[in-house]
Amino acid sequence: MRAVDILKAIQKLNPAEKHRLREYLINALTASSSTGPVLQEISERKNKEGYQCPVCESEYVIRFGKYTTMVDGEEVIKQRYRCKACRMTFTDLTNTALYRTRRLNQWIKFIECMIEGYSLRKSAELIGNVSHVTLFYWRHKLLSSLKQMEVSQFQGIVEMDETYFLYSEKGQRKIKGRKPRKRGGSAKKRGISNEQVCVLVARDRDKMTLSWTLGMGRLTKEQLDNAIGHKFSKGNILCTDSWRAFRTYSNEKGLDIYQFKSDGKIRTRGLYHIQNVKNYHRRLKGWIQRFNGVATKYLDNYLAWFQVLESIHHQRNEVTINDLIIKGNLLPNKETYDTLRLSEFSH
């Protein structure tokens, strides 16, 4: 059958049949041949400025032979290195999310499922031979790397606004001071209180976005400066809501600012408004609702995940998936199952 005939046949499928076909493609068409190119690309990008020891950061590094491992039934040749300063041996994947993995092809399938928005249990069913618990740790190992990615300085007009999420200890077996909530729950106190986590979102007109948890309760000037003060220049113009911390910060830094009250009576002043960042808040909160509450200690990871989805516009193709797994393994990552499980949110 010719390709054009296949495409015509696909168009005749009903929605349920198309959905089953999509699941089959996720499971069957992620070729193991992509394993080699991904590892090679990680090596080239990671060592573009020369070799460096991940332990002592020395540049006195030599190649120390190659070895072969089996990844999803395929032989993959990996380069080993040795540091002449500390005598440690390592590979291109040492201290990365993929360190010691033998399931690279399943990682690629899992990233497809993450982009598609499947649950962990659904992803485990599609991938096969891996549990949803393992996929949970895979998710956060990758996201803990992606959230380290630096963004450049903001350009021109910058919209900035804070939003709040209810503090959550989801997954914790023993919660002190209150009864466990179900499916996210609700706060005991009205308005903004120390029960809620402040998330700052800043976004310029080129769609460069930064989102980060700042602490419990209302945003302060010090938190704002520590989080993104280094991303601003004298040429930036801030558009914010009417919270006083924004005004105080802009006055100290000598930045122009336009503020808009939450009553919505004045939403724009020419080019100046905060509609883009408000819409980002709405999409972010709608997306997070699918998880029925997110543990606050993992919230920064989910913010990074949403930023990635926004930047790729939910495209699912080989280039996007490979690029995502490559970028997630260019930054140091020493997270393990225990460090993730025992981590705590720093107020």
Image (cartoon, rainbow, N blue to C red):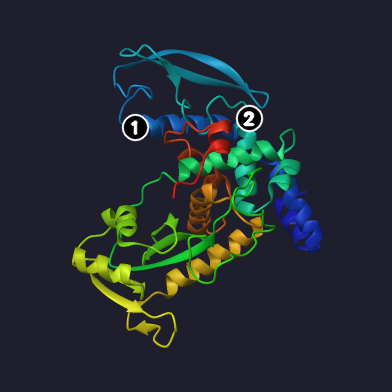
Q: Residue at x 59, y 59 (%)?
A: 288
Res. 187 visible in picture: yes
- The disc at residue 57 is none
Image coordinates of residue 34 in percent, x first then y, are: 58, 34
Image coordinates for residue 154, horizontal then vertical, percent = 30, 60
Q: Is residue 15 left or right of residue 215?
A: right
Q: Where is residue 31 in the image (x, y as percent from the top left)?
A: 65, 36
Mark 2 crowd level (few <14, some 14–19, many ≥20, 10 Å Cα): some
Which kind of residue does numbered mark 1 sit on?
Lys
Closer to us: 224 or 106: 224
Q: Marks 1 and 2, how far apart in space? A: 26 Å
In the displayed orientation, state which residue is furthest to the bottom.
265
Residue nearest the observer in this picture, 73 or 115: 115
Q: Residue at x 63, y 34 (%)?
A: 105
Residue 117 falls in image quadrant:
bottom right
> Relative to 274, does residue 195 appear above or below in the rendering?
above
Badge 2 element? loop
| Between 311 and 201, the one nearer to me in the picture | 201
Q: Residue at x 31, y 26 (%)?
A: 50
Which corner quadrant of the image does residue 241 belong to? Answer: bottom left
| Closer mark to the observer between disc 1 and disc 2 | 2
Residue 160 placed where, x, y %? 37, 67
Which SS class for mark 1?
A: loop
Q: Circle 1 sits on which residue?
A: 48
Q: Mark 2 highlights which residue?
A: 103
Q: Which of marks 1 and 2 is nearer the N terminus?
A: 1
> Identity of the amino acid at label 2?
Arg
Q: Is residue 191 above or below residue 194?
A: below
Q: In this view, does 176 lie to the left or right of 229?
A: right
